[in-house]
Every structure is written in structure tokens, then in C-alpha cells.
Image (spheres, helix red, strand yellow):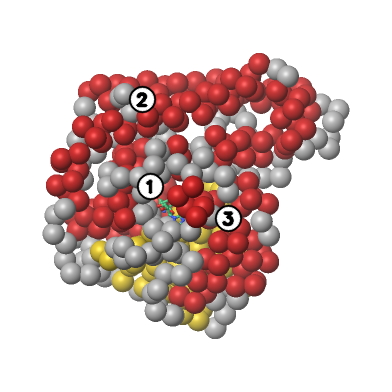
């Protein structure tokens, strides 16, 4: 098994942050929500900017924002944070990453230069982002719920793999997963069809090295990982029945999303599907304020531009047809409909087809 930064003190510290995060989500958010309802009463046209100004005059909003920002920072950066834990376990993590792999399982292409915006932000507040050190993949994995992380996304990717299967009743034999990270999205898709040819593409070498090792442990012999920009993967044209991504779109500026959709079109065979799981908030000033603020506080500056982007036009320009957006169920089975009673991300799937 892939080593995850652990240790009793680390686990206790992350559990403390998890409890604080629950307080933020389940106790503070309803109070803020009630304040927002009071402020909005009698002002039907109030947009998120005006709402932020009115809420700022009260105490809860500032504390809510501060707590969200700093709980996330503490998760990574404190003496018992995930970075320190990974550094302490560095030998074991490196030994795992260095194990020999079957030929072709991993192609790292060291000459690829990521776009400027990619390394400009310490994404999710992870110091150095996903490329800052060879331990970055293991740190990201721990943060994504691998070992007492603050945000648990139990079963999300498995449910996404099932969603893809439901929407491809004839099955699929070739899949490209763009922005695959350490394989959290790619591997459940590959496990759903172990004989299929699956390629995970990402810019982060530390994440890809981890993904390839986990795939090896799972015995996924026809899954491989390639370091490339999702906008120009270098994979052959028409090599995929389905192109997926999970949580990639909101990490890129709109012009990059448009280019990625053109690349998805190139990679797909005629009739193939482009399927992307991401976040799209409903048209409600308070929910948009929460979501856009979450993006800023989490160092994810393209969250808001994604929500404002004309995705239908971008798909059409890329040559993809019949684009539709569906809400995607949250982990407790509820529709991903943030309602201000508990913190939820506005999960949505964007699906379209290559004509043919
Ligand atoms: C939030 S993570 C999601 C990872 C994975 N899909 C998952 O669901 O766990 C976004 C990933 O997209 C990758 N990424 C961002 N921009 C990219 C690009 N232009 N080309 C390839 N990968 C990119 C990042 O390195 C990161 O691993």
C-alpha cells in the first residue's frame, strides 16, 4: 500500500482540524445563512458583491472567511501539518515512489513547461502546489482524505465511474482522464473496466509517480500515466471512446478550458463522450458568494471564471454537440445543492458528444 503521512500526533491534529471544520460548516454557516436572509430581505436584486459588503458590516462573515482560510492553511503548514508529516515519512514515501514499474506505465516528459498560471498559485494552499517537491503527490493524497484529511470525499470518484458507465451503456474500451492527479479519478474508472486502455494525463510529476505505483498495486496492467498539458496531450487523435476529468476545469482559466475541450474533441473517436465533473454554483447571490470566496480562500482563482463561462458556446466552438449539465449527487446521497445549512460543493457533470 502507498504510505500515507501518519503518526498519532498527526492524526490527532488532523482530527482537531476536522472537528473545527465541522463547526465552521454545521454551526457557523447556518448563522451566516440566517444573517444573509435578513440582509437580503426587501432587496431582491442584490448580487454577491453587494451582499458581501452588507455582510462584512457584521461579525460572522469575517470570522467565517478567516476560519475557512486558516483551517486549510493549518492542515498543510503547521508543525503537525501534512507537509511536516510527509517530510518525516519521506524515506518510506520515496522508497514507494522509486519501485520499478512495468515498461510504459509512466512517461514523465521532463521537457514540458507548464503554463504560467499553473505554478503561480499554491493550489489548495499546499506549499509549492503539486510540483513543489517530490513528496507533493503524497501530501495531496493525504489532504484529499487519504489519512484523516479535513475534507473527506468518500466514494466520489467511484460514483463518478458508475455515472460514466450508466451514460455509456455499450461500455468503453479506451479512456483518457485529463488532470488525473494521483489517480483518484483514473483508478476507479480503470477498475470498472480492468481490460480497457486507460491513460491518466497530468502536469504534476509527483502526482503521476504516485498514481502509477498505486495502479501497479491494484494490478491495472493496461492503465498508464503521462505527463502532459491537458490542452495538448500529445496522445494520438481519435484514441478514446471517452475523455473525462474531475475537478480540472475550475483549476484553469477559461481560455485553457476552451483549448482543453478542443483537445478532448481531437482525442475522441466519432460518437465518443466528453465528461467533466466540476463545480457550478446555482444562480443565487449567497451561494455564489460562498463558492467564489471558497475559491479565493483555497487559492483556486479560476473557480469564479468557470462559473461565469459560457460552457455551451465553448463546447460548440470545440466541435462537441448536445452539451448538457447535470447535478451530481453528494456523498450522503443528497443532490449537490448547497442550501446554506451545511457546507457543500456544487457538484455538476458537463457531458457532450463528438458528432459521428
Ligand atoms: C483538483 S486536482 C484533481 C485531480 C483528480 N482528477 C482528482 O479528482 O482527484 C486537479 C489536477 O489537474 C491538474 N492540472 C491542472 N491543470 C492542468 C493542465 N493544464 N494539464 C494537465 N493537468 C492539469 C493538476 O496538476 C491536478 O493534479
Up-down relation of residue 98 to residue 345 (above or below): below
Q: Position of residue 37 (x, y in %)?
A: 74, 26
Q: Position of residue 97 (x, y in %)?
A: 20, 51
Q: Residues within 10 Å of mark 3 (few under 14, many from 20)?
A: some
Q: Which mark is residue 130?
A: 1
Q: Position of residue 39 (x, y in %)?
A: 77, 24
Left or right of 262 on screen, residue 188: left
Left or right of 103 on screen, residue 135: right
Q: Can residue 156 be seen at all in this image of the molecule?
A: yes
Quadrant of the image for the C terminus?
A: bottom right
Marks 1 and 2: in contact by CB < 8 Å?
no
Q: Which one is earlier in the sequence, the residue at label 2 or at label 1?
A: 2
Query: What residue is shown at x 38% (from left), y 47% (from top)?
Result: 130
Up-down relation of residue 78 to residue 166 (above or below): above
Marks 3 and 1: in contact by CB < 8 Å?
no
Instruction: Place residue 258 in its image quadrant.
Output: bottom right
Q: Which residue is mark 2?
A: 78
Residue closest to the eye, 193 or 234? 234
Q: What secondary structure is marked by label 3? A: loop
Number of labelled discs? 3
* The residue at label 3 has a CB less than 8 Å from ligand 1: no
* The residue at label 1 has a CB less than 8 Å from ligand 1: yes
Q: Which mark is residue 253?
A: 3
**How far apart are labels 1 and 3 at the CA level?**
17 Å
Amino acid at each position: 500500500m502507498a504510505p500515507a503521512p501518519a503518526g498519532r500526533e498527526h492524526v490527532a491534529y488532523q482530527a482537531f482540524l476536522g472537528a473545527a471544520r465541522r463547526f465552521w460548516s454545521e454551526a457557523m454557516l447556518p448563522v451566516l445563512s440566517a444573517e444573509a436572509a435578513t440582509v437580503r430581505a426587501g432587496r431582491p436584486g442584490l448580487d454577491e458583491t453587494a451582499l458581501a459588503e452588507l455582510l462584512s458590516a457584521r461579525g460572522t462573515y469575517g470570522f467565517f472567511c478567516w476560519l475557512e482560510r486558516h483551517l486549510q492553511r493549518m492542515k498543510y503548514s503547521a508543525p503537525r501539518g501534512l507537509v511536516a508529516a510527509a517530510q518525516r515519512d519521506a524515506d518510506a514515501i520515496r522508497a514507494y515512489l522509486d519501485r520499478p514499474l512495468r515498461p510504459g506505465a509512466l512517461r514523465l516528459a521532463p521537457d514540458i513547461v507548464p503554463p504560467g498560471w499553473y505554478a503561480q498559485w499554491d493550489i489548495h494552499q499546499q506549499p509549492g502546489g503539486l510540483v513543489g517537491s517530490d513528496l507533493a503527490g503524497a501530501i495531496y493524497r493525504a489532504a484529499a482524505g487519504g489519512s484523516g484529511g479535513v475534507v473527506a470525499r468518500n466514494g466520489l470518484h467511484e460514483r463518478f465511474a458508475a455515472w460514466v458507465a450508466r451514460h455509456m451503456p455499450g461500455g468503453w474500451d479506451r479512456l483518457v482522464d485529463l488532470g488525473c492527479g494521483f489517480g483518484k479519478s483514473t483508478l476507479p474508472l480503470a477498475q470498472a473496466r480492468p481490460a480497457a486502455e486507460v491513460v491518466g494525463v497530468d502536469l504534476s510529476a509527483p502526482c503521476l509517480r504516485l498514481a502509477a505505483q498505486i495502479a501497479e498495486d491494484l494490478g491495472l496492467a493496461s492503465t498508464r500515466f503521462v505527463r502532459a498539458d491537458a490542452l495538448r496531450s500529445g496522445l494520438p487523435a481519435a484514441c478514446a471512446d471517452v475523455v473525462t476529468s474531475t475537478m480540472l476545469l475550475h483549476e484553469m482559466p477559461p481560455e485553457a478550458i476552451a483549448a482543453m475541450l478542443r483537445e478532448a474533441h481531437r482525442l475522441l473517436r466519432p460518437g465518443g463522450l466528453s465528461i467533466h465533473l466540476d463545480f457550478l454554483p446555482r444562480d443565487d447571490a449567497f451561494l455564489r458568494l460562498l463558492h467564489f470566496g471558497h475559491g479565493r480562500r483555497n487559492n483556486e482563482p479560476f473557480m469564479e471564471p468557470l462559473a461565469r463561462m459560457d460552457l455551451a458556446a465553448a463546447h460548440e466552438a470545440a466541435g462537441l454537440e448536445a452539451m448538457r449539465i447535470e447535478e451530481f449527487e453528494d456523498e450522503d446521497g443528497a443532490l449537490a445543492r448547497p442550501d446554506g445549512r451545511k457546507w457543500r460543493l456544487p457538484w455538476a457533470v458537463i457531458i457532450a458528444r463528438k458528432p459521428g
